[in-house]
Image (cartoon, rainbow, N blue to C red):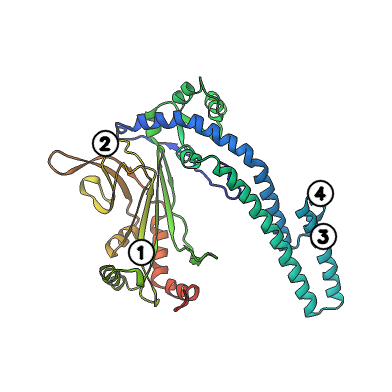
């Protein structure tokens, strides 16, 4: 599905020898995905065609907005005078150039104010045009109903070629053209010949370099986190480590006591009058349905048989797996040491316990350096940055 702004980079999958037999439902789940995505991606392609002119227009206006901000007057010759917005931009460039010459001849505060007001006006005009385009695109997308959610399981997936070709005997789709061409593989669709090969595909991305905390214009916090991504077949597992911010007024008595004890043990998190924070690890995994006979998942250090469990979640919810857990000193030490984490699916045994169905070993590339840098930031500069971004007493 076309997005007017933003691009998602996808890494390259590598084939790795899997020591585990693939789960009992894995082949059925992936066969269904490959078959269903033939029609879904055909609908996405139709939507892309509808959105293409709007996307082109949006990108052009974004470039024009940047030219205005940087006063790149060379853009004048490329502006389309037949377009009302671009004609206004061209008129602004001409008028602004004339005002700039007058200011050089006779610099006055009033001249600067008039230039600033004119710039604000034309920037607002371009922004309104961009918002109108986005609204038109949103209206088109709304007519497709749940296509966006349905196509999510297809985007970036690796398909089983035999299942796709079988479905393509009665349906037309861009996926079909790509599946039939095994000589010149396309970057937008990827295929393997069997579920066994798919189960052996792995991808590991290094934990990202963290930056300082930031607050967006809408008041949301960002930054101050590091993210590591692992892919096994079509299962994508993301781990994000950073401070979890909590308003003191939202905490229950027991939560406040636990947060205070954790902050005391770590030596930070109590410097703001309304906000406390603790180091946390969030997990997301594309596991809406079990691919084996598992009933739960655990995130852990160590082997499944001797697991040091950080978090557990239920299988078969129909939604992506999500969870967050605050970390104490022992687990922080393991992260800083680069000890690898794993996600294991469990099924009950007849004796009341659980046994592993399969395990996904998660990336530890750059884990030690990234988490160590963030822990140092949380113990030092974070409190100052929070106070500057969200002054005590502010809403």
Observer-nearest of 295 and 271: 295
Corner quadrant of residue 281: bottom left
**Outermost residue, top side:** 169
The residue pinned by badge 4 equals: 82
Name the element at disc 1. strand
Q: Earlier in the sequence, mark 2 or mark 4?
A: 4
Q: Residue at x 83, y 70 (%)?
A: 99
Q: Report, in whole angstroms, how far the alpha carbon at label 1 lies from the one at label 3.
A: 53 Å
Q: Report, in whole angstroms, how far the alpha carbon at label 1 lies from the one at label 4.
A: 56 Å
In this view, 300 is above or below 217: above
Number of the front mark, 1 or 4: 4
Corner quadrant of residue 27: top left
Local packing at callout 2 (Cα closer than 10 Å; few below 14, some 14-19, many 20+) is some
Q: Report, in whole angstroms, how far the alpha carbon at label 2 lies from the one at label 4.
A: 63 Å
For the question of whether residue 156 can be seen, the reply is no
Q: Residue at x 70, y 53 (%)?
A: 61
Local packing at callout 3 (Cα closer than 10 Å; few below 14, some 14-19, many 20+) is some
Left or right position of 309 against 369: left
Q: Earlier in the sequence, mark 3 or mark 2?
A: 3
Name the element at disc 3. helix
Q: Earlier in the sequence, mark 1 or mark 4?
A: 4
User: Of the numbered discs in the image, which one, if any, rests on residue 158?
Assistant: none
The residue pinned by badge 3 equals: 91
The residue pinned by badge 1 equals: 279
The residue pinned by badge 2 equals: 293
Q: Earlier in the sequence, mark 1 or mark 2?
A: 1
In this view, 25 is above or below 340: above
Left or right position of 378 against 186: left
């Amino acid at each position: 599905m076309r997005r007017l702004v933003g691009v998602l980079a996808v890494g390259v999958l590598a084939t790795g020898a899997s020591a585990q037999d693939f789960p009992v439902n894995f082949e059925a789940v992936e066969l269904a995905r490959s078959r269903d995505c033939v029609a879904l991606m055909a609908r996405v392609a139709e939507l892309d065609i509808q959105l293409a002119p709007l996307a082109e227009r949006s990108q052009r206006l974004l470039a024009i907005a940047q030219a205005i901000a940087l006063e790149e007057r060379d853009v004048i010759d490329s502006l389309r005078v037949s377009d009302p917005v671009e004609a206004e931009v061209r008129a602004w460039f001409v008028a602004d150039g004339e005002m700039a010459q007058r200011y050089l001849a006779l610099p006055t505060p009033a001249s600067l104010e008039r230039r600033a007001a004119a710039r604000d006006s034309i920037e607002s005009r371009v922004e309104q045009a961009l918002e109108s385009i986005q609204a038109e695109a949103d209206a088109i997308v709304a007519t497709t109903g749940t296509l966006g959610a349905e196509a999510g399981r297809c985007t970036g997936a690796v398909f089983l070629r035999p299942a796709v070709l079988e479905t393509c005997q009665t349906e037309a789709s861009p996926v079909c053209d790509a599946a039939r061409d095994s000589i010149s593989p396309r970057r937008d669709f990827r295929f393997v010949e069997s579920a066994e090969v798919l189960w052996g595909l792995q991808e590991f991305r290094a934990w990202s370099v963290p930056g300082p905390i930031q607050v967006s214009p809408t008041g949301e916090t960002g930054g101050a986190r590091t993210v590591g991504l692992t892919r096994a077949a079509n299962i994508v597992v993301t781990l994000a480590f950073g401070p979890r911010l909590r308003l003191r007024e939202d905490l229950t008595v027991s939560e406040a006591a636990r947060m205070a004890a954790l902050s005391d043990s770590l030596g930070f998190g109590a410097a703001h009058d309304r906000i406390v924070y603790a180091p946390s690890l969030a997990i997301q995994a594309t596991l809406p349905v079990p691919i084996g006979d598992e009933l739960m998942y655990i995130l852990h250090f160590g082997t499944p048989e001797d697991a040091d469990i950080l978090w557990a979640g239920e299988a078969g919810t129909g939604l992506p797996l999500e969870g967050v857990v605050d970390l104490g000193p022992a687990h922080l030490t393991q992260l800083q040491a680069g000890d690898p984490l794993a996600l294991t699916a469990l099924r009950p045994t007849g004796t009341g316990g659980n046994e592993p169905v399969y395990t996904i070993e998660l990336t530890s590339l750059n884990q030690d350096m990234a988490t160590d840098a963030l822990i140092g930031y949380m113990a030092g500069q974070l409190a100052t940055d929070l106070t500057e971004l969200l002054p005590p007493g502010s809403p």
